[in-house]
Amino acid sequence: MSDEWDMISFVIRSQYRVAVLERLVEGPATPSRIATDTDIAIAHVSRALSGLREREMVELLVSEDQKKGRVYGITDVGEKVWHRLQQEGMV
């Protein structure tokens, strides 16, 4: 349970992580698509994706070798965290 709260805390400490997770709940997307859809600079999106990926809330859906057109999706862990954020009225 405390792990879940650690993850929730990690997400809500950054408006960019919140926005990226919210966008990925709608479906997989490339960083540039996320940037466009959320109106956030690509550098912030990339940093948010990196942090969320380290905590296994998002995953790369294409080969690690692919440098362009990388598609990211939300994991079950990410979905659980997102739904908990909504339940608790934090987003």
Image (tube, rainbow, N blue to C red):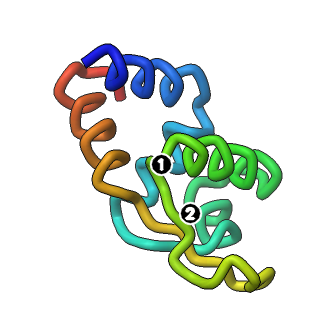
Between disc 1 and disc 2, the foreground one is 1
Rendered residue at 50%/37% (across/down) = 18
Rendered residue at 56%/44% (across/down) = 52
Crowding around mark 2 (Cα neighbors within 10 Å: few <14, some 14 to 19, many 20+) is few
Q: Is residue 79 toward the left or the right of residue 55 in the image?
A: left
Q: Using the rendered view, name the quadrant where residue 72 is placed.
A: bottom right
* Residue matched to label 1: 56
- Secondary structure category for the residue under label 1: loop
Judge whether 81 appears above or below 49 on screen: above
Q: Where is residue 53 in the image (x, y as percent from the top left)?
A: 57, 51
Rendered residue at 69%/52% (across/down) = 45
Residue 86 badge: none
Answer yes or no: do the residues labelled 1 and 2 have beta carbons within 8 Å? no
Q: Is residue 72 toward the left or the right of residue 46 in the image?
A: left
Q: Is residue 1 toward the left or the right of residue 71 in the image?
A: left
- Secondary structure category for the residue under label 2: helix
Q: Where is residue 33 in the image (x, y as percent from the top left)?
A: 62, 72
Type of amino acid under label 1: Glu
Depth check, front residue: 74 or 63: 63
Type of amino acid under label 2: Asp
Q: Quadrant of the C terminus?
A: top left
* Residue matched to label 2: 37
Q: Distance between the residues labelled 1 and 2?
A: 22 Å
Rendered residue at 43%/60% (across/down) = 24
Q: Position of residue 64 (x, y in %)?
A: 69, 77
Q: Quadrant of the N terminus?
A: top left
Q: Position of residue 14 (x, y in %)?
A: 61, 28
